[in-house]
Image (tube, grey):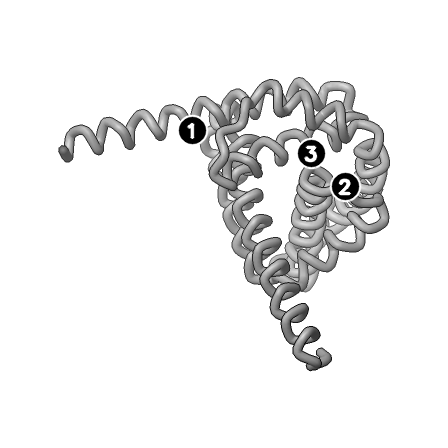
């Protein structure tokens, strides 16, 4: 029995790694025109979200489906994210010079900026992948989710940064890294959304009982 369990666990790991590799390749191909980074990331998180939710997605067809359905709106998301990332990278370039003098406030600000940019970007693409919302609503809700469910955001950010550091040591991980990050991000996004829905349900019940909050 133990051997059978180990075999199943082994094949499950191989299956997950192959899924991450396929997702990563699809994402990289989808990003090639650069302007389609938003559409490709949304499709990546759409498939990863289904997998984290316990469903078995048809990776290629589901990726293409989400890519096509969200293509137009994702262009606006890409524009917003482009401005956000360009501004942040400009600040990083300026901040790196000040780090030569040793640890200072610039490092803390850079970490905070990285946290905001990464998590808001993830929530924007995840919300676009999961819900039919107006672009402004997606931008607003991504900011709110990042801070309202701060613990989940911190955990996700910590894991993602750790994975990026692993990439520096083992460059070959790039073949599975986008897919792996998408799965990790989707897990924490799902936790945040479940908590939000649970809170909304509680508030609804309280309102029905005549209690206003």
Which of the two labelled residues, at mark 2 and mark 1, occupies the earlier sequence position? 1
Crowding at label 3, few (<14), some or many (≥20) Cα neighbours within 10 Å?
many
- Assess disc 1: are there few (<14), some (14-19) or many (≥20) residues with their C-alpha within 10 Å of its C-alpha: some
Residue 118 lies left or right of residue 160; in this view the side is: right
* Relative to 23, residue 91 above or below: below
Which residue is painted at 58% across and 60% down in the image? 195
Measuring from the top left, give residue 194's x and y in whole percent.
Answer: 57, 55
Using the image as rendered, state which of residue 200 and residue 13 is in the foreground: 200
Q: Are marks 2 and 1 in contact (CB under 8 Å)?
A: no
* Label disc, if present, on residue 42 of the rendered structure: 3
Mark sitting earlier along the chain (2/3): 3
Q: Foreground: 29 or 142?
A: 142
Provide the secondary structure element on which disc 2 rests. Answer: loop
Q: Position of residue 60 (x, y in %)?
A: 59, 19
**Residue beneath label 2, please?**
132
Residue 103 vertical position relative to residue 43 in the rendered view, above or below:
below
Image quadrant in which you'd find residue 50: top right
Q: Position of residue 184 (x, y in %)?
A: 52, 42
Q: Nearer the viewer, mark 2 or mark 1?
A: 2
Asked whether 16 or 163 is in front, the reply is 16
Q: What number is the disc on residue 16? A: 1
**In this view, the mark in front (2 or 3):** 2
Residue at mark 1 to residue at mark 3: CA–CA distance:
20 Å
Q: Earlier in the sequence, mark 1 or mark 3?
A: 1
């Amino acid at each position: 029995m133990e051997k059978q369990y180990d075999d199943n666990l082994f094949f499950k790991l191989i299956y997950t790694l192959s899924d991450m590799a396929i997702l990563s390749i699809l994402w990289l191909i989808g990003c090639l025109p650069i302007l389609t980074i938003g559409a490709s990331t949304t499709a990546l998180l759409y498939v990863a979200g289904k997998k984290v939710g316990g469903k078995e997605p048809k990776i290629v067809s589901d990726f293409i489906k989400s890519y096509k359905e969200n293509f137009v709106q994702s262009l606006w998301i890409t524009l917003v994210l482009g401005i956000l990332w360009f501004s942040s990278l400009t600040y990083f370039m300026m901040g790196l010079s000040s780090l030569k003098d040793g640890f200072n406030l610039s490092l803390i600000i850079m970490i905070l900026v990285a946290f905001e940019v990464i998590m808001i970007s993830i929530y924007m693409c995840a919300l676009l992948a999961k819900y039919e919302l107006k672009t402004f609503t997606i931008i607003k809700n991504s900011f709110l989710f990042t801070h309202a469910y701060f613990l989940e955001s911190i955990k996700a950010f910590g894991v993602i940064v750790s994975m990026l550091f692993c990439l520096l040591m083992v460059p070959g991980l790039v073949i599975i890294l986008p897919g792996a990050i998408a799965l990790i991000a989707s897990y924490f996004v799902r936790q945040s959304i479940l908590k939000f829905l649970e809170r909304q349900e509680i508030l609804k019940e309280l309102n029905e009982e005549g209690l206003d909050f």
